[in-house]
Amino acid sequence: MVECLRKSVGQDPFFGEEITHFLYFINHKYVESCPAVLESSFLNVNVADMHMMVSRPEQWVKPMAAAGANQYTFHLEATTNPGNLIKEIRESGMKVGLAIKPGTTVEELAPWANQIDMALVMTVEPGFGGQKFMEDMMPKVSWLRSQFPSLDIEVDGGVGPDTIHKCAEAGANMIVSGSAVIGSDDPRSVIALLRTVVAEAIQKRSLDR
Ligand SMILES: O=C(CO)[C@@H](O)[C@H](O)COP(=O)(O)O
């Protein structure tokens, strides 16, 4: 089943300023349809971050760039040649995100950290929203922040008002939140809370330096 999930973006201009995190988890025969879906979606988003939870991510770089994607995030586990894929993404004009599943160590990501724009630390097993936040992934975020102070570090999975403080204090500056936002009676206030907590943690880190 293919699910091209648009998060935190709608017609509401409030959401328009967020980065839109599009998820692809797929079985291949459907993925061809997604770039066309995205092209129509990009009309009202500022930045489209494509989280490609697919095997053989190489094959979708060009279609996603053509559809207007700004950032292409692939999983380290899904390729045998991360360096070549990073080069292809850059040559297509997109920023590079590199994601690791819970079972992948942050040391496996480290050799690529200076070549990417963003590291994505999954705090659930890729597959579907609404799963429980895996707090034991936070040391990965802390280690990345300590080694790469200016790297964008994203956390994805089970993030909401109850878990955002752990993510922000560990050093995450980009947050994917699905159920906590979409399932809320007041998505605006949830997004505002997530942003405030992260902004305050960033400010505290800069003061502590
Ligand atoms: O990436 C995935 C699953 O593969 C999800 O973690 C969603 O991206 C976030 O959904 P919530 O966990 O916030 O509901």
Image: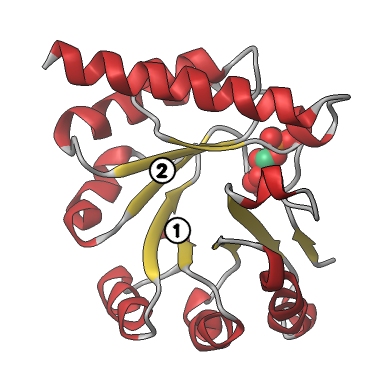
> Are the residues at dot 2 and dot 1 in contact (C-beta closer than 8 Å)?
yes
Q: Residue at x 47, y 61 (%)?
A: 73
Distance between the Cα atoms at labels 2 and 1? 8 Å
Q: How many marks?
A: 2
Q: Nearer the viewer, residue 176 or 204?
A: 204
Q: Residue at x 26, y 44 (%)?
A: 151
Q: Position of residue 166 (x, y in %)?
A: 47, 14
Q: Secondary structure at mark 2?
A: loop
Amino acid on which disc 2 is placed = Thr
Instruction: Report whether 69 appears left or right of 97.
Output: right
Q: Quadrant of residue 190?
A: top right
Q: Position of residue 199 (x, y in %)?
A: 41, 24
Identify residue for label 2. Answer: 104
Q: Can residue 130 be seen in this snapshot?
A: no
Q: Residue at x 50, y 88 (%)?
A: 62
Q: Position of residue 77 (x, y in %)?
A: 45, 58
Please tell me the numbered disc located at residue 77: 1
Label 2, residues with CA under 10 Å away: few <14, some 14-19, many ≥20 = some
- As drawn, 109 above or below 105: below
Q: Secondary structure at mark 1?
A: helix
**Quarter of the image that includes the N terminus:** bottom right
